[in-house]
Image (cartoon, grey):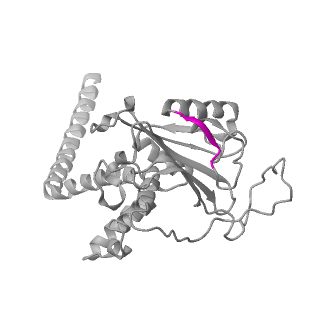
Amino acid sequence: MYELSRVRLYSIGPAGARYADTVLDLRGVGEPVPDPAPTQAEFFEEEPVGPPRRPAPAGVLFLENGGGKSVLLKLIFSVMLPGHRNTLGGASSGVLRKFLLADDCGHVALEWQHVHTGECVVVGKVSEWRGRQVSNDPRKFAEAWYSFRPGPGLTLDNLPVAEATSVRPPVEGASGAQGRRRTMKGFRDAITEAGKAYPHLEVHWEETHERWTEHLGDLGLDPELFRYQREMNADEGEAAGLFAVKKDSDFTDLLLRAVTDTRDTDGLADLVSGFGNKLGRRAELIAERDFTAGSVDLLGRIVEAAEARTRARDVHTAA
């Protein structure tokens, strides 16, 4: 199980709530990690660092109306639950496209930390307008998703979002990105080259919703949990609406959707449907079975009589 450790947003958001380069840091204030994975100490570390701690168990973000709270949630959900149908708050299908200007190459990167080992994984989304022109045609809106294990060669701090990136930011909380923004192709080439040079990064790139969702499951980040979060925050109100079921069967359906994989239940549905068809033809099948059993019995007697006649003929011919 993973917990959200940091969020980085770069060159994305609507005109009134833009994220030029923002990092929300939740690290190091939770309980100590019970079974930390071995890590190499920083080369220039001044003082020894103790066992890693989990991220903050809870947090509050205070912003005025229009400050970007809903935008932040929508961007985070666009990484973990891709597709305009899954947009938080019941927004229109083009709401995420409104968060990107013509010259933008927007980034949303999430760093997750494992609750037991302290190991981290970064998952992110990059998007831009093809041809550097805003359009109402959704086919001109390019999206892609990526993941990697942060370590020497690539971390959340030195994501190659710009042509130059310092090894570490000059000031805590400041951006290390310098120079012109990279295009999506330039960003992909940069992290791909980093993955070739440092295999431990396990860089992965996807451009389709289905494959990305499957990859999140392989990493241990279950998108289904975010689906329920989206439903509970559909109107940015209370979460009780998700569980306001009218019948016992509705709650059973909710529970089954939560604990089963649809790819497996499709096969189960076919099996149940097959049994249902057989039960519907029960009387017909029983009559057919009885007829077949009676026919086999009579045919068996004929075979025995034919064999007895053949033996008698053989005896008669020999005599």
Q: Which residues are magenta?
A: 175-182
Q: Quadrant of residue 307?
A: top left
Identify the residue at the far right of this view: 47
Residue 43 lies within the magenta run: no
Q: Position of residue 82 (x, y in %)?
A: 40, 49
Evaluate whether residue 224 shows in this view: no
Where is residue 13? Give x, y as percent.
43, 50
In the image, 58 versus 97, the foreground residue is 97
Does residue 307 lie above or below 72 as drawn? above
Q: Position of residue 49 (x, y in %)?
A: 81, 60
Q: Which of the image's four quarters has the N terminus?
A: bottom right
Q: Which of the image's four quarters has the C terminus?
A: top left
Q: Is residue 42 left or right of residue 174?
A: right
Q: Nearer the viewer, residue 22 or 308?
A: 22
Q: Residue at x 21, y 47 (%)?
A: 297
Q: Quadrant of residue 151?
A: top right
Q: Position of residue 168 (x, y in %)?
A: 71, 46
> Foreground: 159 or 212?
159
In the depicted structure, whether residue 127 falls above or below residue 86: above
Which corner quadrant of the image does residue 66 belong to?
A: bottom left
**Image: 304 above or below 68:** above
Q: Which secondary structure dominates the residues rendered in magenta?
A: strand
The residue positioned 74% from the left and 60% from the top of the image is: 36
